[in-house]
């Protein structure tokens, strides 16, 4: 009886160690980490979108000549906030590309808007504008960091589901699919625009 008990306990222990080494826990852990990092990316894009109406409002009265750019940025913001990626779509390259394109258009429009304000000293000296500009620059940096962290989590997850022995659990138990990293859709779009507010001073 004692031998059978020890043998069964040893088999159970060996089975649990084998299963643990086959991605039972590591695959969902890596996936949840990537999803959490994606939530950080979305939060930073939302922060940028929330700042834009305030920036547009500060600029509207003083920059009537820039009405086209203001309209373009407002429309780009509406599109960017309407294209959403939830955790279930992180393995969908088409949905990710659509989201990336919308964010790129918004970033480019915002860069043009901020650059155009160099011609309006009454705007660039406005404390509200300066505060918003600073917040937007900080947000662009936060977006870059969040994207970097998400892409690293995706790399770790994709590596986990492709390497032995985790690939056994990933394919057999979890049916894991590779996640899509965030990529800039235009060259340099992942870099915050540089704005020179000192020209002419």
Image (cartoon, grey):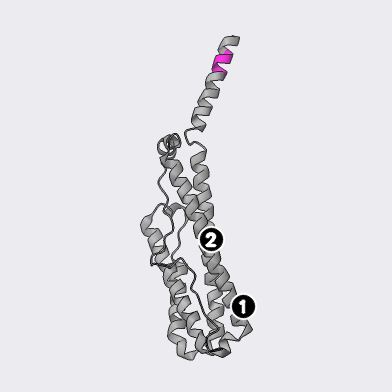
Q: Is residue 60 visible?
A: yes
Q: Residue at x 41, y 35 (%)?
A: 172
Residue that label 1 marks: 131
Quadrant location of the C terminus?
bottom right
Identify the mark nearer the N-term, 2 or 1: 1
> Is residue 24 located in the magenta-colored stretch of the structure?
no
Per the image, label 1 sits on a secondary structure element best described as: helix
Q: Which residues are magenta?
A: 5-9
Q: Nearer the viewer, residue 51 or 182?
A: 182
Q: Nearer the viewer, residue 48 or 83?
A: 48
Q: Is residue 38 visible?
A: no
Per the image, label 2 sits on a secondary structure element best described as: helix
Q: Residue at x 53, y 76 (%)?
A: 52
Sort mark 1 into few (<14), some (14-19) or many (20+) by Cα contacts within 10 Å.
few
Residue that label 2 marks: 145
The span from disc 2 to disc 1 (Cα, nearest Å) is 21 Å
Q: Residue at x 54, y 82 (%)?
A: 197
Main SS class of the magenta portion in the image: helix
């Amino acid at each position: 009886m004692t031998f059978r008990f020890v043998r069964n306990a040893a088999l159970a222990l060996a089975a649990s160690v084998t299963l643990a080494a086959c991605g039972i826990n590591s695959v969902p852990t890596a996936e949840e980490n990537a999803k959490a990092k994606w939530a950080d990316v979305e939060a930073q894009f939302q922060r940028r979108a929330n700042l834009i109406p305030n920036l547009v409002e500060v600029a509207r009265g003083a920059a009537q000549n820039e009405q086209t750019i203001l309209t373009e940025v407002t429309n780009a913001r509406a599109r960017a906030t309407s294209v959403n990626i939830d955790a279930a779509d992180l393995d969908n390259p088409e949905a990710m590309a659509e989201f990336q394109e919308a964010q790129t258009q918004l970033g480019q429009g915002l860069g043009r808007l901020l650059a155009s304000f160099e011609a309006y000293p009454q705007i660039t000296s406005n404390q509200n504008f300066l505060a918003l500009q600073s917040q937007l620059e900080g947000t662009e940096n936060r977006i870059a960091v969040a994207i970097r962290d998400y892409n690293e989590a995706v790399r770790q997850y994709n590596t986990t589901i492709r390497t032995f022995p985790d690939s056994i659990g990933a394919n057999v138990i979890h049916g894991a699919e590779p996640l899509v990293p965030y990529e800039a859709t235009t060259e340099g779009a992942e870099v915050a625009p540089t704005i020179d507010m000192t020209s002419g001073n």
